[in-house]
Image (cartoon, rainbow, N blue to C red):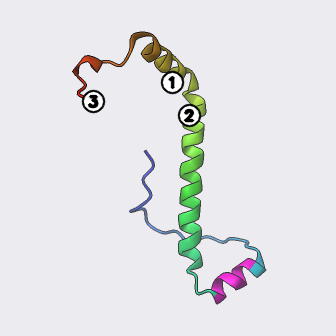
Amino acid sequence: MLQFDKAPKKATNLSLNSKVLEAARELGMNISQTVDALLADEVKRRYWQKWNEENTEAIDHYNARIKREGLPLAKYRTF
């Protein structure tokens, strides 16, 4: 699984829209922290999207089996 919380920071150069950057600074936003958090969210989203695409066949087979045979250990459920 993706784990970004304790990774060290690394300096990088970004090209950002100058008007957006100016507005963010006027609002007192921490640009580095904001970009880091948004990029991490997008990386996670794309990672899981790719994972789902790569595993669609297995997921479909599993769901078909559950539909056909029911949930394993279902007889022990109390709800």
The residue labelled by disc 3 is 79
Q: Quick check: 8 left or right of 28?
A: left
Whether the residues at callouts 2 and 1 have beta carbons within 8 Å, the answer is yes
Query: Which residue is found at the position 43% from the left and 17% from the top?
Result: 66
The N terminus is located in which quarter?
top left
Q: Is any atom of residue 10 visible in this view? A: yes
Residue where numbered disc 1 is placed: 59
Residue at (70, 80) in percent of width and height:
21
Q: Earlier in the sequence, mark 2 or mark 1?
A: 2
* Mark 1 → mark 3, Cα distance in angstroms: 25 Å
Spatial separation of the CA atoms under disc 2 and disc 1:
8 Å
Looking at the rendering, the stretch of residues picked out in magenta corresponds to: 20-26
Instruction: Bin the neighbour count of mark 1 within 10 Å (Cα to Cα): few under 14, some 14-19, many 20 and up.
Output: few
Task: Examine the structure image and report whether residue 51 is included in the region drawn in magenta.
Answer: no
Q: Which circle, 1 or 3, is nearer the viewer?
A: 3
Which mark is drawn over residue 36? none
Residue type, label 1: Ile
